[in-house]
Image: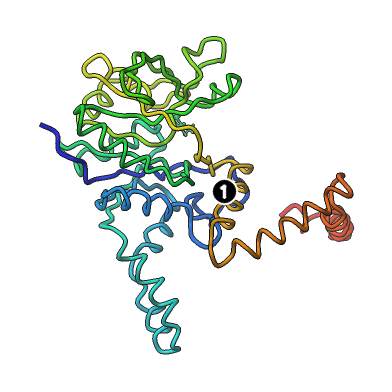
C-alpha cells in the first residue's frame, strides 16, 4: 500500500548550456528570478504541497546550492548586530525551509540516471520529482492535485501540457486515453523528444512527476537511449508495462527558465505579481512599451552600448581581447 508521498527529488546536475555564458561558473539553478534563485521557488513549491524532505541531485560546481540553503552563521551575526532584522528573518527562513539532502551525480549520464541516484534515500515509498528548469507561476496547486490523484489511484502521475505541434520534439511526449475525470488521462505510451510527424500527440511531459517506487527497478533495467543517456522517459515507458500511469493536464503557468526567453518572461511575471515591486515595475514596463510603440525598431540604448563596446574592444591589444 502506497502512502502519501513526503519526499521530493530535484535533479540539479545539468550543465545549463542553454544559458551560457551566465552558467559558465555558476549553476543555472542559482540564477536569480527577481531576488531568489530559481531552485528556491522549486523547493517552496514542494514544501507548499507537503513535500518537506527534499533530495537534490547535484554535480560538479554546484556547491553554491548547498551554501544557499545552509545556515549562514557569519551573515546572520552581521545582520543581527547591524539591526537588519527583516533581512535576518529572510536569511534564516531559507535554511529552515525543508529537510534538505544532497547526493552527487558523478557523471552526467542522463535524467533517468539522476533520478535513480535517489533510490537509497527514497527506499520503498512513492515520491515526487520536480525538474528545476520548470518554474510554475500559477495559483493552480499542481503538485497537490497530482498527489491527490496518486493517493486515489495508487499509481504514478505525470504533469502534461499541450504544446504547439512543431515544439513537441523538445519534450517527452505521450500517447493517452481519456478517463472519466476531466483533465486526467491514462498514459498508454511515451517517447522522448519525437520528431513532430512521429509524435503520438501534442501532449508534452513537463517537469513534475509523482512516481511509485517501482520506477527504480525500471530505471535499472533500461539501456542508454536518446543521446546515449539513461532517459527518465524510457524508465516510464517500461513502468507502463507493469502499472497504470496517469497524466494530469495543465493549461499554462509553466516556464522553462533554462531558456533565455522563458527566463526573462518568468522574471517579468514574478516581479509583476509582487506587492512590493509590481505596481512600480508595471509603470516602468508601460513606459518602455510606449517608447517601443513610437519607434518599433531596436531601441537606441543597446545599439549605442554595442557601438561603445565595439569601439573599446577594437582598441585593446589582440592578446587581451582573446582572453
Ligand atoms: C526533460 C525530459 C523530458 C521533459 C522535459 C520537461 O527534458 O527528458 O521528457 O519533457 O524535461 O521540461 P530536458 O528539458 O531536460 O531536455
Q: Horizontally, is 291 left or right of 51 in the view?
A: right
Q: Residues within 10 Å of mark 1 (few under 14, many from 20)?
A: many
* Residue annotated with mark 1: 266
Q: Is residue 61 above or below residue 86?
A: above
Secondary structure category for the residue under label 1:
helix
Percent coordinates x, y for residue 272 in the rendering = 59, 56
Residue 306 in percent (x, y) is at 84, 54
Residue 193 rendering spot, x and y as whole percentages: 49, 21
217 with respect to 72 (left or right)? left
The N terminus appears in which quarter of the rendering?
top left
Q: Is residue 304 above or below residue 119?
A: below
Residue at image position (32%, 23%) is 181
Relative horizontal placement of residue 223, taking residue 25 as reference (left or right): left
Figure quadrant of residue 94: bottom left
Position in image of residue 217 (x %, y %): 21, 25
The quarter in which the C terminus is drawn is bottom right
Q: Residue at x 38, y 79 (%)?
A: 76
Q: Residue at x 22, y 46 (%)?
A: 6
Nearer-the-camera pick, 199 or 222? 199
Q: Give whichever of 83, 294 is nearer the camera.
A: 294
Amino acid at each position: 500500500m502506497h502512502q502519501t508521498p513526503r519526499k521530493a527529488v530535484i535533479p540539479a546536475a545539468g550543465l545549463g548550456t542553454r544559458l551560457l555564458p551566465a552558467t559558465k561558473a555558476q549553476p543555472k539553478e542559482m540564477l536569480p528570478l527577481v531576488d531568489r534563485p530559481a531552485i528556491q521557488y522549486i523547493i517552496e513549491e514542494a514544501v507548499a504541497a507537503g513535500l518537506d524532505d527534499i533530495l537534490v541531485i547535484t554535480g560538479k560546481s554546484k556547491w553554491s546550492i548547498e551554501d544557499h540553503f545552509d545556515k549562514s552563521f557569519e551573515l546572520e551575526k552581521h545582520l543581527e548586530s547591524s539591526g537588519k532584522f527583516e533581512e535576518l528573518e529572510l536569511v534564516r527562513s531559507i535554511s529552515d525551509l525543508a529537510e534538505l539532502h544532497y547526493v552527487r551525480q558523478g557523471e552526467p549520464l542522463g535524467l533517468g540516471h539522476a533520478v535513480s541516484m535517489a533510490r537509497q534515500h527514497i527506499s520503498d515509498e512513492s515520491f515526487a520529482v520536480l525538474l528545476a528548469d520548470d518554474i510554475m507561476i500559477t495559483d493552480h496547486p499542481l503538485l497537490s492535485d497530482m498527489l491527490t490523484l496518486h493517493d486515489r489511484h495508487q499509481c504514478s502521475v505525470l504533469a502534461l501540457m499541450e504544446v504547439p505541434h512543431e515544439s513537441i520534439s523538445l519534450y517527452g511526449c505521450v500517447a493517452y486515453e481519456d478517463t472519466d475525470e476531466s483533465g486526467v488521462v491514462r498514459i498508454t505510451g511515451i517517447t522522448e523528444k519525437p520528431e513532430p510527424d512521429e509524435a503520438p500527440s501534442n501532449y508534452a511531459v513537463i517537469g513534475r512527476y509523482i512516481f511509485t517506487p517501482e520506477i527504480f527497478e525500471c530505471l535499472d533495467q533500461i539501456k542508454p537511449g536518446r543521446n546515449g543517456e539513461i532517459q527518465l522517459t524510457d524508465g516510464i515507458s517500461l513502468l507502463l508495462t507493469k502499472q497504470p500511469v496517469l497524466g494530469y493536464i495543465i493549461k499554462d503557468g509553466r516556464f522553462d527558465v533554462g531558456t533565455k526567453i522563458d527566463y526573462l518572461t518568468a522574471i517579468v511575471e514574478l516581479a509583476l505579481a509582487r506587492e512590493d515591486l509590481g505596481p512600480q515595475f508595471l509603470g516602468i514596463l508601460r513606459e518602455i512599451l510606449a517608447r517601443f510603440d513610437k519607434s518599433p525598431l531596436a531601441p537606441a540604448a543597446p545599439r549605442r552600448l554595442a557601438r561603445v563596446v565595439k569601439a573599446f574592444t577594437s582598441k585593446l591589444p589582440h592578446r587581451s581581447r582573446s582572453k
